[in-house]
Image (cartoon, coloured by chain):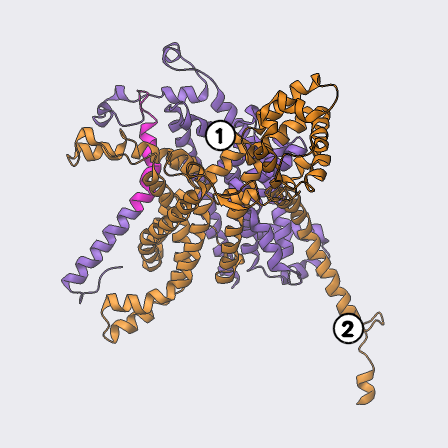
Chain colours: A purple, B orange
Amino acid sequence: MALPTYTTTGQRIGYYTYLFYCGLVFFFLIAPIFMIVPLSFNQSPFFGFTPEMLRFEPEAFSLRWYRQMLGICRPDDIITTVCTNKWMIGTKNSFIIGLAATFLATALGTTAALGLSRPHMPFKGTLMALLISPMIVPLIITAAGIFFFYAKFGLVGTYTGLILAHTALGTPFVVITVTATLTGFDTNLIRASQSLGADTMRTFFKVIMPLILPGVISGALFAFITSFDEVVVVLFLGSVEQQTIPRQMWSGIRQEISPVILCMATCLVILSIFLLTTVELLRRRAERLRGIRL
Amino acid sequence: MNQAAKAEILTTDGIPLKVSLRRAERINKFRAFALVLPLTLFIIITFVIPIIAMLTRSVDDKQINTVFPKTFELYKQWDRKELPTEEMYATMFGEIVNADKRAIGKASTRMNYSKSGWKSLIKKSKRKFKKIKEGPYKEQMIAVDKRWGEIGFWKALGEMADPITFGYFLNAVDLKYDSNKEIIRQPENRRIYNYTWYKTVKISVLVTLFCLILGYPIAYLLATLPLKYSNLLMIFVLLPFWTSLLVRTVSWIIILMKKGVFNSILVWAGIIADENRMQLIYNETGTLIAMTQILLPFMVLPLYAVMKTISPTYMRAALNLGAHPMHAFYRIYMPQTVPGISAGGLLVFVLAIGYFITPELVGGADGQLIGHWIAYHLKSTLNWGLCAALGTILLVVMLALYWVYNKVVGIENIKLG
């Protein structure tokens, strides 16, 4: 957005001030996330930049906290810190719960979105509001409700309980993204497929699915990150066995502030960059496909 | 003509077309509904029912009535002026002795909320009453513990006589029942919730305002820049959105700590002295800063979506007609972005009032929102009635805002990424 030639000096100053302000806001948004990356390579058990780090001395950086995160212990590490593989257990739990919840949420959410997008759907608004409610209700209220209710069925402190809760929390995202993909869907394609003799299942997997796949995958990724990042429900519903990564980080922040948290945080930032890229690519592909059709 | 109208159009099967169409319509409706049904049932069972069940706890007072049913029968006839009759003492005695240990434990916890001392009194009585073999019970009970002879304790039971109570809701706004079931204010030192409610709303409003002040300009920039630049800058908004909440909270702790990055930069630059580093975290300031950054994408994305649809020709026309750029922006552009402002504002506000994780970690004692007390009563004090009452109030506020949001924006128009 180059400035036109006729702008006055005052307007120029105003415009560059505005750009500077925007730059600051972008910095405010992004800097905190990348701040932790160099700190995770800190040699000392300290949460800030040491003078040595700022002078870029190689001895100031180390991978010791990463080793500790992975549960690999060297003799000299054990002297200063406790050596456990709780972070790896947390990672395993996060993936078990996250993947199971994502699978359920995607299956249920996609089916529901297909129904909601049909022109004949009765009570569409009400149903949509109901299905999106897990995203709106504060997590602390959800956690309290689920804790009391699941306790009656012995689901507190079980993987099943957590997976069910996380599925409920993840479905709104799947419903929203798949419904959005379906808004541009040409229903004549279904009729064409059926008139050519394909049955319902074949139509679904050969015609509908490939077209809505970008939406389904984005929804699944949203559901996965929701579960992967969720800590309040795990806090109340999970026992010692179901410690997930966020749960470990939570107790890590509150009790023993150790730079291992920063290593895990760095890994999570990399994961989020990966997920964001995937979703963006899918979105663009969907836009392109829609562009061709129009 | 008349005959033609009467003769209905038939399909090849000989069924009237109208009937056939209606049937097809019904089948379609049924199919659509069948697709939505599994998720609807799942959400109702795993999500809606648990929350409703929790909400009923906020008024539920049945527990104590199941432990002392007969005593409460008599209680309703008591004049509440002098000590109860021997009959009532005897019933109470019987019910304490025969009660299940767990049930009476729970009941006494509940009794303790209306007057402290009940829990220890019941515990002591349960142990010592075994020695009393026969009546009259009144004197013997008072001999075991003289609190049995205090009318205040008996009166305190009054608020529990009904199976439904609004006591927890009163507690949630710093009120309570006195022994005559009149509504009074909590004693000075126990008034915490009104202040917390006020603080929750205040912080949410401030966070919404900050998000608007920070988010509006960048949404405008993103909407007006050519697509190749704006797509790149959009990553700055979307990456925080995708990054773990805990990661962002941790980074704010690192930045805002006394020995943290921000203070160190200021000291290094000579702006503040080393000994008066600012306390930016574990107080309200910390909560405000961290929550603003965390919720900012939720403001920018709806604003961007609205601004993207505004045609630049309006602004050009205004400038062409001689309006000062600021004036044109204020009079022409801003009114068109109001839907975006209300959508983003509502979204941020709704998310902010229910926030728990970030305030809990960076808020210290001063920066806690109402979510803190819900969690506290859920896990620490086990005062689940109060926990549910606080939750209900919060949920009602949320749902009201959600309803407004639905009216203003339409719930189907929520967009992600």
Image coords of residue A129 (percent x, y): 58, 54
The residue carrying mark 2 is B18
Along the viewing direction, whichever of A194 and B50 lies nearer the viewer: B50
Q: Nearer the viewer, residue B165 or B147?
A: B147
Residue at the image position 49 percent from the left and 23 percent from the top: A88
Magenta span covers which residues? Answer: A26-46
How far apart are the two marked residues, 2 and 1, measured between alpha carbons? 60 Å
A43 falls in the magenta region: yes
What's under tag 2, amino acid-wise?
Lys
A256 sits left or right of B149 in the view: left
Q: Which residue is mark 1?
A: A247
Secondary structure character of the magenta stretch overall? helix
x and y percentages locating residue A75 in the rendered image: 39, 9
Relative to B75, say whether B27 is above or below. below
Q: Are marks 2 and 1 in contact (CB under 8 Å)?
A: no
Secondary-structure class at tag 1:
helix
Question: Looking at the image, is A242 positioned above or below residue B80?
Answer: above
Question: What's the chain of the residue with tag 1?
Answer: A
Quarter where residue B94 is shown: top right
Residue B399 x %, y %: 53, 53
Counting labels gives 2
